[in-house]
Amino acid sequence: MKVAMFYGPGDVRLEERDIPEIEADEVLVRIRAALTCGTDIKTYRRGHALVPPPSPFGHEYAGDVVAVGERVERVTEGMRIVAANSAPCGHCFYCKRGRESLCENLFFVWGAFAEYIVVPGRIVQKNLLEVPEHVTYEEAALTEPLACVIHGVEASNIQMGDTVVINGAGPIGLFFTALVKQKGARVIQTDLVEERLSVAEQLGADHIINAQEGEEATIHNVKALTEGRGADIAIEAVGYPKIWETTIKMTRKGGTATLFGGCEKNTTITVDTTSLHYNEITMKGVFHHTPHYIRTALNLLSWGSLDTQVFITEKMPLSRIDETLKKVMAQKGVKIALIP
């Protein structure tokens, strides 16, 4: 089979490997569609602690089951499935308290940019779902990133009538826009790329702000739209410490800053302690997903709750993975579907 291997920043190679054998609790899946993701691009650009090279690459996919381990139940050959890239253990301190995204034994799998992938037993048990016939493979592959954003929306406690500013109109920021609008909130979207801001408008953003004017101007524009107060909820969906700081400054007294985008390891932010204390701002970090959010995400996709065509802007063969990654790094389109 063909598989994309990550050897280091800027170095992804398409190689020939044997189709792997499966263990008794595993499933072999023929990948029909895999999507590009911001995490993949960050890894491609600077590496990632969870993707030690050389490593298979990619993690958003859907496909067909072609082999089933003898101890696997409820999964059959030929089943159309989507699987998450991780699964919690279910028995650690955090899992027992319903915080599965913080699982002490969170188990990750990479390798979506390939023709086949082995789904380990724990993921088969907790985070592998059958895809309804009316949902395409490309749409089903949106399940994992959508699940993460559902987690972020729920953790932000958005109420009908709130004003929410979303910093970043990449795939994650645009998912936030679509879901926050369904909560009955007003959305202010900021980004540096006009093309992505126009997509945010398609998804229902009430106001768009091009952040190229700089931090102070962007904060001023947000406050001008909120009678000088700032947003009820401000969401960071980029993954840069400076934007974390900007997001906090956009939050009104008593509001919540949701810091969603993962920053580079060992980076820090500076917070005005006076503002934090006297304005009673809540700063909240949100990471990853849980089995509940994975199921919820596939339900929303199955019900047609999102305009999926907005998110999947192009299809390319797996053989053009280098071109694909460079295109996404240049912020062309939203997500590209790689078709093995």
Image: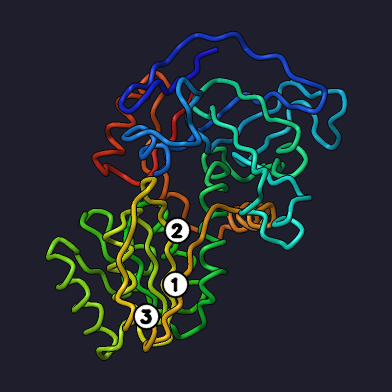
Q: Which amino acid does label 2 sit on?
A: Phe
Residue drawn at the location 64% of the way across and 43% of the way down: 106
Say whether disc 2 or disc 3 marks the residue closer to the N-terminus: 2
Mark 1 neighbour density, 10 Å: few (under 14) some (14–19) many (20 or more): some
Mark 3 neighbour density, 10 Å: few (under 14) some (14–19) many (20 or more): some
Q: Label 2 to label 3, Cα distance in Å?
A: 28 Å
Rendering coords of residue 81 (x, y %): 67, 37
Q: Is mark 3 on a helix, strand or loop?
A: helix
Q: Which amino acid does label 1 sit on?
A: Met
Q: Using the rendered view, name the quadrant where residue 216 is placed.
A: bottom left
Q: Is mark 1 on a helix, strand or loop?
A: strand
Of the two numbered discs 1 and 3 in the rendering, the one whose residue sits closer to the viewer: 3
Mark 1 and mark 3 residues within 8 Å of each other at the beta carbon: yes
Residue 121: in sight, yes or no?
yes
Mark 2 and mark 3 residues within 8 Å of each other at the beta carbon: no
Residue drawn at the location 12% of the way across and 65% of the way down: 213
Q: Which amino acid does label 3 sit on?
A: Leu
